[in-house]
Image (cartoon, grey):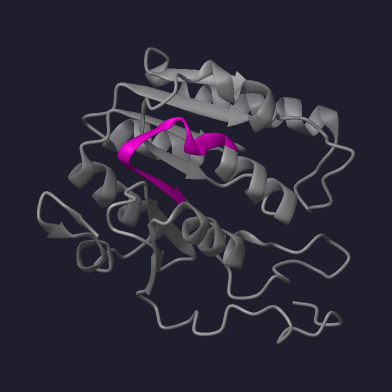
């Protein structure tokens, strides 16, 4: 996977943090239009808006609402979500001319983004099987041919949280999605992944970390709690 002749994996593996990794990627891609799914308090968005010099439009997708069918630790009360929304608003207000806040679930607001308009989409929202399935499928048509989808919480175990919560399924579903779309995917450091919308390359899974040799789920006992 290359951008302007530069090997993406080698370039990104030199990063010292998640923030540096994506800042380096956005710089080399010269990202102009991107979306973030799962904005929370806006820390990632604020960092990108400060450092991505080519960025013109930044779509911010998040319901900022308590969801009765989302069994994850961050599903806090409505009043807390209102505070979180206000915090995000303050943190990113300096780039109000670039941001496009879409408050709602992905499937509810995604069509406010034109088809094939995104250079890059970053997914850090609902990490359940349902969530990552909907996010990847719905954002796919919004990404330009040759564009990219990246994401967080590409964990080596589905039991990211206590077993009373729904398992995190970003891995392996993202790999299976890339295989279904016949495109390449890379496992990066800091629990990140990167998919390129390039069917000419065909499917491949490149693990830059050496941590994802076995993608099967039955190696994890359901009683395991981390």
Q: Position of residue 224 (x, y in %)?
A: 80, 82
Residue at the image point whose x is 70% and y is 78% from the top: 217
Residue at the image point whose x is 37% and y is 25% from the top: 117
Position of the N terminus, as image quadrant, is: bottom left
Residue 50 belongs to magenta span: no
Residue at the image point whose x is 35% and y is 75% from the top: 208
Q: Position of residue 124 (x, y in %)?
A: 57, 47
Q: Nearer the viewer, residue 27 or 41?
A: 27
Q: Position of residue 88 (x, y in %)?
A: 57, 29
Task: Answer with left or right where residue 221 lies relative to residue 158.
Answer: right
Bounds of the magenta segment = 138-150
Residue 143 belongs to magenta span: yes
The image quadrant that residue 53 belongs to is top left
**Above or below, comparing residue 57 to residue 215 in the picture:** above
Residue 150 visible within the image: yes
Majority secondary structure of the magenta segment? Answer: strand
Position of the C terminus, as image quadrant, is: bottom right
Residue 38 visible within the image: no
The image quadrant that residue 183 belongs to is bottom left
Q: Position of residue 31 (x, y in %)?
A: 27, 35
Task: Answer with left or right where residue 133 lies relative to residue 209.
Answer: right
Q: Nearer the viewer, residue 27 or 182?
A: 182
């Amino acid at each position: 996977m290359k951008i302007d002749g530069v090997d993406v994996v080698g370039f990104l593996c030199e990063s010292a943090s998640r923030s540096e990794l994506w800042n380096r990627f956005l710089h080399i891609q010269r990202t102009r239009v991107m979306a973030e799914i799962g904005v929370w308090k806006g820390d990632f968005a604020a960092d990108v808006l400060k450092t991505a010099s080519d960025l013109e439009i930044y779509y911010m997708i998040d319901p900022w609402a308590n969801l009765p069918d989302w069994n994850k630790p961050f599903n806090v009360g409505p009043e807390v979500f209102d505070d979180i929304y206000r915090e995000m608003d303050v943190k990113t207000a300096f780039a109000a001319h670039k941001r496009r806040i879409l408050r709602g679930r992905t499937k509810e607001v995604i069509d406010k983004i034109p088809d094939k308009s995104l250079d890059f989409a970053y997914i850090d929202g609902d990490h359940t099987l349902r969530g990552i399935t909907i996010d990847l499928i719905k954002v796919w048509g919004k990404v330009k041919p040759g564009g990219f989808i990246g994401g967080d919480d590409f964990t080596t175990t589905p039991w990211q949280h206590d077993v009373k919560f729904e398992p995190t399924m970003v891995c392996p579903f993202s790999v299976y999605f890339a295989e279904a779309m016949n495109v390449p995917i890379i496992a990066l450091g800091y629990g990140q992944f990167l998919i390129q919308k390039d069917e000419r390359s065909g499917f491949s899974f490149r693990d830059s970390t050496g941590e994802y040799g076995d993608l099967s789920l039955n190696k994890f006992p359901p009683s395991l709690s981390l």
